[in-house]
Amino acid sequence: MIPLKRIKHLELWLLLTCTVAITVSVVIIFGQWKPRVTIETLDAIGEGGLAVMSLIWLVATLLSRPAGRVTTALSYGLILMHVSLLLDCLDEFLTFEHIHPTLSSLEAFPALLGMIVMSFAMYWWYQEQTYLNLTLLKKERHFREHTFTDYVTGLYSARYMEKQISNEISLLNDTTRHFCVAMFDLNAYNQFCFEYGIAKGEELLRNTGQLITLHIRGCDLTCRYAGDKFVVLFPATPYITAQIIIDRVCDAAKRNYQYDDDLTTINAMTLSAACVEVSSDTASTKVFDQLISQLKQKKQAA
């Protein structure tokens, strides 16, 4: 059983549970049940469905978002909207006319207050997203599609890179700008996994992806190709400039160290690199083939 202190957003879960319980209890205690013949089934189903959907949105927010003022404000706003929709649904079964004829009209006010709170949350979310977009620029390059994400490194996959390369190739017809594509290969990766295990190997892959991303420009894009290989797209970049960046990445990798459980340093992140300049219409798969061929020749010559 998970300890209460380890439950994510425990206070918000408790607030949701208490709010729903109090709302339902108050309505049942003080309301009067309507005759069955006066209940409109379609209205009850529709309003009940809205209440359920708002609850699903709220649960999804609590499960997916980290703690912070955006999550808190979104949760407060959704809780207020859920209360309003819940009252609207229960109003199909119970009435308060015996207390006051206009009491049922107040059910919309929690939703209004919730929308005001969520308006602040959306503004703060916009500020947060602006910062995240700048942070993820080297990983996404203005296009976000998480079905192409590599789950080990958090980078996009080769399929995503193929689309980006195809976009750059299509621009070659309109401009004379060339672009470059580089491939990095972790040396002795299989031996590292054999000595330290798969989990440590996946950690090495994540660190390698972060190191490459850190040492390229904001306009460049890093993706994981396959296995221990990474691909970087250098848009509108001549070969000489791309090679300078590649050398900088390889030099940084030589100075980077992993640690085992005993804090012993392991210099495992040594990289081999290949680069091609694309100046004519070609298939992205041919670009990858050229890069892999270059890497094989370099390894054989070493």
Image (tube, grey):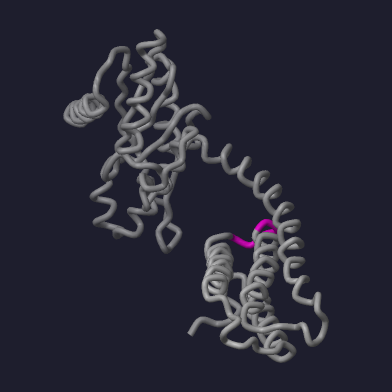
User: Is any atom of residue 107 visible in this view?
Assistant: yes
**Residue placed most toward the observer, 10 or 214:** 10
On the picture, is 53 further left or further right than 200? Answer: right
On the picture, is 160 further left or further right than 3? Answer: left
Quadrant housing the C terminus = top left
User: Is any atom of residue 14 visible in this view?
Assistant: no
Q: Give how far across and how far down residue 140 sits, in percent.
A: 46, 37
Direction bottom: furthest residue: 29
Q: Give how far across and how far down residue 293 sits, in percent.
A: 19, 27
The magenta stretch is 66-70
186 over 73 or under it: above or below: above
Direction front: furthest residue: 37
Q: Residue at x 49, y 33 (%)?
A: 142
Q: On the image, which quarter does residue 259 sit in?
A: bottom left
Q: Is residue 69 magenta?
A: yes
Direction left: furthest residue: 300
Kindly report the secondary structure that dominates the magenta region of the rendered protein: loop
267 over 248 or under it: above or below: below
**Residue placed most toward the observer, 9 or 117:** 117
Q: Is residue 235 magenta?
A: no
Q: Residue at x 37, y 52 (%)?
A: 151
On the picture, is 243 further left or further right than 19? Answer: left
Q: Tag count in the figure? A: 0
